[in-house]
């Protein structure tokens, strides 16, 4: 017995005739019979032919009409295609379908005209799985255009034969035969078109005829199945349409176990082969009932033999935690790899029961959507796709909805049932991709092990499918290996002056919490991976050390002890936070960044601050630095940017954990003003820049940051800013600046060791040139000469070195070959803006094994 409830109601039976004959001569497909589906994409043309007239996009379209004939029946129809067929442009005629929507999961049979083998073949569809059961002759419809007429027969015992004429007439040749009795009832007949944008108006259908073989129905109706709708209602299905006068007689139905006759018997609306039986008494749970049926006639007067059928009522199925799992998510679809440009989330039904998502909710951290009635079959993947994109996946198991806008860098995805009970949740971050290129967009995150209780970074990773993901299908990273990776803390923040949130990359269990100085607290684990600690009696101006240890993930991996300093945020004053580094002219399509440093001895809260610019002489475009009360500690550097992954990619000298991804005001490439505001719009710091602040000898300013030289000098002092050193990659986001001002008495250039041996043994493999210069405005040339005074390597030419650093020579000459063993002169010339020239000559020895 199958639990149906509202589930089976989705598969609505349409209006049925014992025979269908349709040549569209009335110029209409809305009556006699009525066709349903994507009616806006079809017309009856001047030739009285059903014509696809869809928008010029790659898509699929369908129409269907009610039909229940399946036993000892023949189907005949004509299809004209004004193109040569391919795997992207083909037609299907559904002979048998258990539901009207031919784009969704269904059971039935269809004829396919075209495809990669240009053939007329019979397919069986089992839910979302399509299997060819009669393989027609390759190339049979290989012409351009195509005109084919098809005749299909099926006997009561399930013997199929496909005939076709590729001239559009009735000079049929057999395309094959087979016995297949998988499905013995049907509800719908229809057409299905798959096309690219240039073929969206080139499908034509005509001369549909469905009739019993021989033309006279002599076969009595038979019961095919019984569905238990609820605790007092049955749906009884027959092989064909029934005579109302016999079908709606209550005394023709009698059940044992004291049920007796139904209180009411009526044809199911729109389904002449279905009977609804209603009982005054409720069915008992898990009781095997026997229903006896007799005296039921079909439309031709054939009377069925007395028949008995069993049914059992099971109480409604209530989904439990993780009966449905979130198995894949595409949070950042651009730049696209080979999938449609849209977010999606994939669900997997782990049970042996159809689950209806009607009234369930899907949420991220900021929004919630309610799901409509949709069925997920047992052990099946199902795709929730963004509205307007779902049809582009070419799937039956897909539903278009207005998804929550999942954040690229990290967010929650939470699914709950209609009562608000949690079914599954994930809290992903960009670290889950484990690949900086894939985290940049176009790749989905996939669950590795459906059978594991783990739902953190250890059980998720970026897809390895070349399309960028596997929406609607088994994940490409399916892995049954044991999780051996311990949980990690990925974020900490204050919710108020006394509540600390510690966010882990996966679910955790209870562990140990220590606080110094000692203070009272309570704690709880929420959303599986978030530790919320509530303190009592915190004092201002005190730094508290919090240590977390002993927490385990679902596989028993224990976290490394984690230490975190916090305190009650204090009120900021001017000079507490300063602007320290600025990238206002990034590389093409790159992101600006602003680096701030806390030069006070206070703990401050980012939620108190915002960045702005100046438009038309007034402060404008104010952007809060954080919605959460993230702490900003003394001597800490923080980098604010719209795309932290872009900054990390372009600047190798960055510090992990110091990035805050947020919207910034626009800062123009030629000039602008950075405004840092505190509470009550207090201006804490202000920097008005122009691109001329960069080092004068640099031609290309793109991707080069301006660094502050001194914390104590005024922010808007021109001499207090300089281009970041080329040696460290033109920027130091999150680190102490490369051009920080220090007192120098004399410049110095030395070799760390005079002898080196470039043999890749890890010991003195390179010659290191260490330099400390008197100021930042210098250009350096370095040329290596052999002992005969011949230049063999131009090591640096017009190099912008910054104040200090290390330059190495690996012993390779300008020809790309290793230099000979011997003594070499390192000639170094330094120029400054005033025209001063310094020359240095150092001696190094290239050694080797004898």
Image (tube, helix red, strand yellow):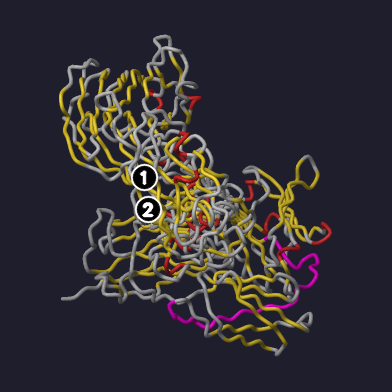
Image quarter in which the N terminus is found: bottom left
- For residue 312, the mark is none
Number of on-image labels: 2
Image quarter in which the C terminus is found: bottom left
Q: Position of residue 679 (x, y in %)?
A: 81, 61
Would you place residue 311 above or below residue 67 in this image? below
What crowding class fits label 1: few (fewer than 14 Cα within 10 Å), some (14-19), or many (20 or more)?
some
Report the side of 373 relative to 625 (left or right): left
- For residue 223, the mark is 1
Q: Is residue 558 magenta?
A: yes
Q: Secondary structure at mark 2?
A: strand
Distance in Å between CA atoms under marks 1 and 2: 8 Å
Q: Position of residue 218 (x, y in %)?
A: 29, 31
Residue that appears at 63% across and 78% down = 524
Residue closest to the eye, 657 or 702: 657
- For residue 309, the mark is 2
Report the side of 70 relative to 708 (left or right): left
Chief SS of the magenta region = loop
Q: Is residue 641 visible?
A: yes
State which tag comes first along the sequence, 1 or 2. Answer: 1
Q: Position of residue 339 (x, y in %)?
A: 41, 43
Q: Is residue 837 visible?
A: no
Would you place residue 34 above or below residue 278 in this image? above
Q: Which residues are magenta?
A: 555-579
Q: Secondary structure at mark 1?
A: strand
Q: Are marks 1 and 2 in contact (CB under 8 Å)?
A: yes
Would you place residue 551 above or below residue 101 in this image? below
């Amino acid at each position: 017995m199958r639990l149906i409830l509202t589930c089976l109601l989705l598969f609505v039976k349409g209006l049925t005739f014992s025979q269908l004959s349709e040549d569209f001569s009335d110029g209409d497909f809305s009556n006699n019979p009525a066709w349903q589906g994507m009616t806006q994409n079809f017309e009856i043309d001047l030739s009285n032919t059903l014509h696809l007239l869809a928008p010029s996009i790659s898509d699929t379209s369908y129409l269907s009409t009610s039909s229940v004939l399946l036993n000892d029946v023949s189907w005949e129809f004509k299809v004209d295609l004004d193109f040569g067929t391919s795997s992207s442009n083909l037609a299907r005629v559904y002979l048998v379908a258990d539901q009207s929507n031919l784009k969704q999961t269904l059971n039935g049979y269809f004829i396919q005209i075209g495809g990669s083998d240009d053939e007329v073949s019979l397919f069986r569809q089992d839910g979302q799985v399509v299997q060819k059961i009669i393989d027609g002759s390759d190339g049979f419809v290989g012409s351009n255009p195509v005109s084919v007429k098809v005749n299909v027969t099926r006997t009561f015992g399930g013997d199929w034969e496909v005939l076709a004429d590729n001239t559009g007439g009735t000079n049929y040749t057999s395309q094959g035969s087979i016995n297949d009795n998988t499905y013995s009832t049907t509800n719908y007949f229809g057409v299905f078109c798959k096309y690219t944008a240039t073929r969206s108006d080139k499908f034509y259908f005509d001369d549909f005829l469905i009739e019993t073989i021989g033309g006279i129905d002599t076969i009595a109706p038979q019961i095919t199945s019984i569905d238990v709708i609820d605790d007092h209602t049955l749906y009884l299905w027959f092989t064909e349409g029934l005579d109302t006068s016999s079908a709606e007689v209550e005394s023709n139905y009698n059940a044992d176990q004291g049920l007796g006759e139904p209180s009411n018997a009526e044809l199911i609306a729109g389904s002449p082969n279905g009977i609804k039986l209603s009982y005054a008494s409720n069915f008992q749970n898990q009781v095997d009932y026997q229903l006896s049926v007799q005296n039921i006639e079909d439309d031709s007067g054939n009377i069925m033999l007395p028949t008995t059928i069993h049914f059992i009522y099971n109480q409604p199925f209530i989904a439990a935690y993780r009966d449905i799992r979130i198995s894949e998510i595409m949070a950042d679809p651009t730049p696209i790899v080979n999938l449609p440009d849209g977010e999606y989330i994939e669900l997997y039904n782990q049970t042996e029961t159809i689950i209806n998502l009607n009234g369930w909710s899907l949420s991220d951290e900021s929004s919630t959507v309610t799901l409509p009635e949709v069925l997920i079959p047992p052990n099946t993947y199902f795709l929730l796709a963004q509205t307007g994109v779902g049809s582009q996946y070419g799937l039956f198991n897909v539903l278009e909805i207005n998804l929550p806008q999942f954040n690229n860098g990290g967010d929650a995805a939470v699914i709950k049932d209609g009562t608000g009970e949690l079914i599954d949740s994930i809290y992903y971050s960009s670290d889950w991709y484990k690949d900086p290129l894939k985290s940049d967009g176009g790749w989905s995150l996939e669950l590795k092990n459906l059978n594991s209780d783990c739902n953190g970074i250890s059980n998720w990773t970026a897809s390895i499918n070349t399309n960028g993901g596997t929406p609607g299908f088994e994940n490409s990273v399916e892995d049954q290996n044991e999780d051996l990776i311990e949980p990690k803390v990925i974020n900490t923040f204050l919710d108020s002056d006394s509540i600390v949130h510690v966010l882990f990359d996966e679910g955790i269990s209870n562990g140990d919490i220590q606080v110094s100085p000692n203070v009272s607290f309570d704690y709880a684990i929420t959303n599986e991976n978030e530790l919320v600690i509530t303190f009592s009696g915190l004092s201002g101006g005190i730094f508290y050390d919090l240590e977390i240890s002993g927490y385990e993930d679902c596989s028993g991996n224990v976290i490394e002890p984690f230490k975190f300093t916090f305190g009650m945020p204090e009120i900021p004053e001017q000079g507490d936070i300063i602007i320290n580094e600025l990238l206002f002219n990034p590389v093409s399509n790159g992101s600006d960044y602003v680096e701030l440093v806390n030069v006070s001895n206070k703990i401050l809260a980012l939620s108190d601050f915002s960045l702005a610019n100046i438009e038309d002489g007034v402060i404008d475009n104010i952007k809060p630095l954080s919605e959460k009360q993230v702490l900003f500690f003394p001597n800490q550097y923080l980098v604010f940017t719209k795309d932290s992954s872009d900054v990390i990619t372009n600047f190798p000298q960055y510090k992990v954990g110091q990035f805050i991804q947020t919207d910034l005001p626009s800062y123009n490439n030629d000039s602008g003003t950075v405004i840092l505001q505190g509470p009550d719009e207090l201006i804490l710091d202000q920097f008005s820049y122009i691109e001329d602040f960069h080092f004068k000898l640099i031609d290309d300013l793109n991707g080069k940051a301006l660094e502050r030289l001194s914390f104590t000098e005024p922010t808007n002092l021109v001499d207090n800013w300089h281009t970041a050193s080329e040696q460290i990659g033109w920027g130091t986001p999150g680190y102490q600046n490369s051009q920080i001002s220090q007192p120098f008495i004399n410049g110095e250039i030395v070799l760390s060791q005079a002898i080196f041996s470039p043999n890749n043994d890890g010991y003195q493999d390179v010659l290191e040139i260490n330099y400390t210069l008197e100021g930042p405005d210098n250009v350096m040339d370095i040329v290596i000469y052999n002992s005969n005074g011949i230049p063999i390597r131009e090591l640096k030419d017009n190099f912008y070195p910054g104040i200090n650093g290390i330059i190495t020579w690996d012993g390779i000459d300008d020809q790309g070959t290793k230099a000979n063993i011997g003594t070499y002169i390192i000639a170094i010339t330094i120029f400054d803006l005033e025209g001063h020239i310094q020359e240095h000559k150092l001696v190094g020895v290239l050694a080797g094994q004898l």
